[in-house]
Image (cartoon, rainbow, N blue to C red):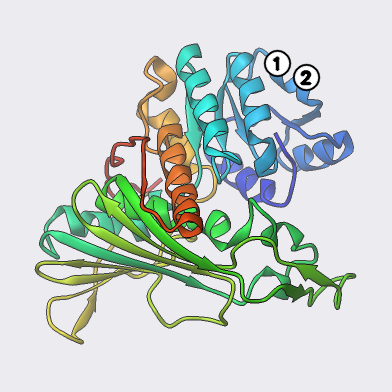
């Protein structure tokens, strides 16, 4: 449901996984739905037709974030499982409503990002679980760019409430931190938006100015249930950074984790200052791509009677959303925010050739 740009990546995955069969694509623009569906050998239909189709077991919800709640609730009401793109919902309250509805209906609720199921983060997870850095004590996650106006022809959303670097890119980093270190119990934060305007630099609107009405630089500290503390830096106010996307520090060593927006990458570890070595791939789905979160729910048995099975659970998506919303709230109020949701640390993915 939703035939925007990201749908192409999902369809590529569905077309090569024998366990998943694409039935239909729905969009408010029926012509667009039919065009995209044709690339996957499926039928383009209306949203109502998709919800009524008896052969549909699950819906991948690729609508815009502010529509995630309305559309996911409709899918759940139709008795179908739903896997929703990040962020889980536009607000924590909406996310809670979605998860409660899925639990009451006994249907599967999954959530992106599923990049953490690839060999990059999962090799790092295997190293943590094997004690290769001792007891994890802290982590630092860093994402610094100049902002999406440098390449996106319509970047308005990213500088309005509901956008910004944390809600846009944070799900990849926070989901990885929870996968590596476990759930978060409280957060603090600080933020700024020192530039009141941005200039679009590509496409037909190049040169047009945008007003900034949401923080464009956010720093947060996440206190994990384990006692570890993660520092989060998400920014549209720089140019680039040489810092590893994620570093994890333990009592016996430190580890550099690859970009969590990708499925693979080099994991490096050191037990001596400056002497870094790459680890052999030790975990994750080797061929992982967009859509493996839903595939993992199928493979785990979530659709065979226990909707709580599988790693890319809606409960994790809600937890990550609440963590990000908590950082933004803490930045605004100057007070620590307690995280009320609870998501179990997802089980590790053994090295899997699929």
How many numbered callouts?
Answer: 2
Q: Indicate which disc residue 53 carries.
A: 1
State the quadrant of the C terminus. Answer: top left
Q: Is residue 145 above or below residue 182?
A: below
Q: Residue at x 72, y 56 (%)?
A: 157
Cα–Cα span, label 2 and label 1: 6 Å
Q: Residue at x 49, y 26 (%)?
A: 99
| Image x and y of residue 281, in percent | 28, 61
Residue 134, quarter of picture: bottom left
Please indicate whether residue 322 sits to the left or right of residue 38 in the image.
Answer: left
Q: Is residue 60 above or below residue 87?
A: above
Please indicate whether residue 160 sits to the left or right of residue 135 in the image.
Answer: right
Q: Residue at x 74, y 74 (%)?
A: 198
The residue carrying mark 2 is 49
| Image x and y of residue 237, in percent | 58, 76
Residue 344 shows up from this direction: yes
């Amino acid at each position: 449901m939703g035939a925007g740009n990201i749908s192409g990546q999902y369809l590529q995955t569905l077309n090569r996984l024998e366990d998943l069969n694409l039935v239909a694509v729905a969009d408010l623009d029926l012509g667009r739905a039919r065009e995209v569906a044709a690339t996957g050998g499926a039928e383009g239909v209306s949203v109502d037709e998709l919800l009524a189709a008896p052969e549909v077991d699950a819906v991948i919800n690729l609508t815009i974030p502010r529509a995630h709640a309305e559309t996911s609730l409709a899918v759940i009401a139709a008795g179908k499982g739903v896997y929703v793109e990040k962020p889980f919902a536009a607000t924590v309250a909406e996310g809670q409503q979605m998860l409660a509805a899925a639990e009451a209906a006994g249907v599967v609720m999954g959530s992106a990002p599923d990049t953490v199921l690839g060999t990059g983060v999962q090799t790092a997870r295997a190293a943590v679980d094997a004690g290769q850095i001792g007891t994890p004590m802290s982590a630092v996650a860093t994402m610094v760019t100049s902002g999406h106006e440098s390449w996106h022809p319509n970047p308005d959303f990213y500088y309005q409430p509901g956008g910004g670097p944390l809600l846009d890119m944070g799900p990849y980093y926070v989901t990885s931190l929870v996968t590596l270190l476990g759930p978060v119990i409280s957060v603090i934060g600080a933020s700024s938006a020192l530039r009141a305007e941005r200039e679009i630099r590509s496409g037909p609107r190049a040169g047009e100015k945008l007003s900034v009405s949401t923080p464009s630089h956010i720093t947060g500290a996440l206190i994990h249930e384990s006692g570890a503390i993660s520092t989060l830096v998400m920014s549209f106010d720089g140019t680039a950074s040489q810092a590893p996307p994620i570093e994890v520090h333990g009592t016996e060593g430190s580890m550099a984790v690859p970009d969590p927006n990708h499925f693979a990458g080099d994991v490096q570890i050191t037990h001596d200052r400056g002497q870094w070595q790459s680890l052999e791939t030790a975990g994750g789905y080797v061929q992982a791509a967009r859509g493996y979160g839903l595939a993992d729910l199928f493979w785990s048995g979530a659709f065979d009677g226990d909707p709580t099975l599988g790693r890319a659970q809606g409960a994790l998506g809600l937890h990550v959303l609440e963590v990000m919303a908590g950082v933004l709230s803490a930045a605004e109020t100057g007070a620590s925010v307690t995280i009320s949701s609870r998501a179990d640390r997802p089980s590790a993915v053994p090295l899997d050739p699929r």
